[in-house]
Image (spheres, helix red, strand yellow):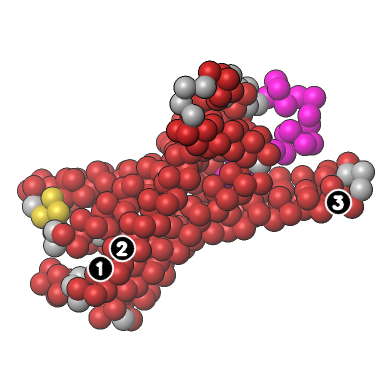
Amino acid sequence: MNSTTAAFLNQDVFYFAFLKNFTVVLLGVVINYMNTMLVFTFFKNQVFSDNPRYILYIHMVINDILLLTLTVSLHVLSYIFQALNVSLCCFILLIAANATMNTPLNLAGMAIERYIAICHPLRHSQICTVRRTYILIAFIWCAGAIPRLTDLFILFATKPLSLFSSNILCYSYDVFQLPYKEEKNYATHAVYLFSVWLILIITYFRILFAAKAAASDAASAKKARNTILLHGAQLLLCMLSYITPVIDTIMLSDFPQYRTHILFLTYLVSHIVPRILSPLIYGIRDEQLKKHMKRYILCKQIVQIRPTKEPFAKACNP
């Protein structure tokens, strides 16, 4: 597909362009607002910053905020400007691809932490320290960066440097037109997919058996099973980011006239929908986060109504 044809296929009538951008921006703002409330609650309470479970979770939330901000901005920019500078586009795509890879890896790390907490509670405080948690986060970022950094190095080696000062449609498929790219992507995603699912299956089944054995009544066992199922559903949705490039490649080759619609739908399914679950699972189901978030929201409303009352100010700032 040459650049002229690609530019033509990138065009949407005004109605579809407005509807797509309005939907993406609205969902991005709503999700980022909920996530920002969770981040605010985390940093306002020492009890969360000393807990590896919440550190890993808030890292995933911040990662989601970064990913949504970048991808929504890129989506809107692709309609305002028909082409972006290749260097700027590469930078945005690298960070966004890294953040996309981070989420499933972070969930795998959270699964391991929960496995140690439930199956080896006496050793949990020794193994899952705050320092080791931040080392794990650094490892997640390094592992998530490997696939796209490899593409960038190959791009530098095979393309002239003048490419990086030119303008192009800012889609990964247009920027990283590399030999054997599809085969490399399939192999890379297969390795990541297998690794994360292997960790998921081993840890969550061990947690499930331990929860059923330790539960004193049916209600506790049911709650433990529901929590595990929700984490599994969240990881399953996040794993769509591994499968989306394959779906895009197949669909775009068969239906090139629907390019913008295909990319929009796969973007919603693989990037927006999984990010809705994070604030819902922890912001609503987690009692600690829910309690502190309610307090801040209620205190904010009280201070706005009665800003001169000292007892309220003390209650809101323990």
Mark 2 burial class by Cα count in 10 Å: few <14, some 14-19, many 20+: few
Give the residue type that dot 3 points to.
Answer: Ala
Q: Is the magenta stretch mostly helix, strand or loop?
A: helix
Give the residue type that dot 2 points to.
Answer: Phe
User: Between 109 and 16, which is closer to the camera in this rendering?
Assistant: 16
The residue to which callout 2 is attached is 22
The residue depicted at 48 percent of the width and 52 percent of the height is: 275
The residue depicted at 27 percent of the width and 46 percent of the height is: 92
The residue to which callout 3 is attached is 219
Q: Is residue 174 left or right of residue 123?
A: left
* Residue 18 marker: 1
Mark 2 or mark 3: which is in front? 2
Give the residue type that dot 1 points to.
Answer: Phe
User: Between 152 and 69, which is closer to the camera in this rendering?
Assistant: 69
Dots 1, 2 in contact, CB < 8 A: yes
Dots 1, 3 in contact, CB < 8 A: no
Magenta segment: 107-127
Q: Judging from the image, what secondary structure is the residue with disc 1 in?
A: helix
The mark that comes first in sequence, 2 or 3, is 2
Q: Does the magenta stretch include residue 225?
A: no
Residue 223 is situated, as x and y percent measured from the top left of the image, at 78, 50
Mark 3 burial class by Cα count in 10 Å: few <14, some 14-19, many 20+: few
Relative to 22, say whether 108 is above or below: above
Q: Quadrant of the N terminus?
A: bottom left
Q: Judging from the image, what secondary structure is the residue with disc 3 in?
A: helix
Q: Is residue 128 left or right of residue 304?
A: right
The residue depicted at 15 percent of the width and 75 percent of the height is: 8
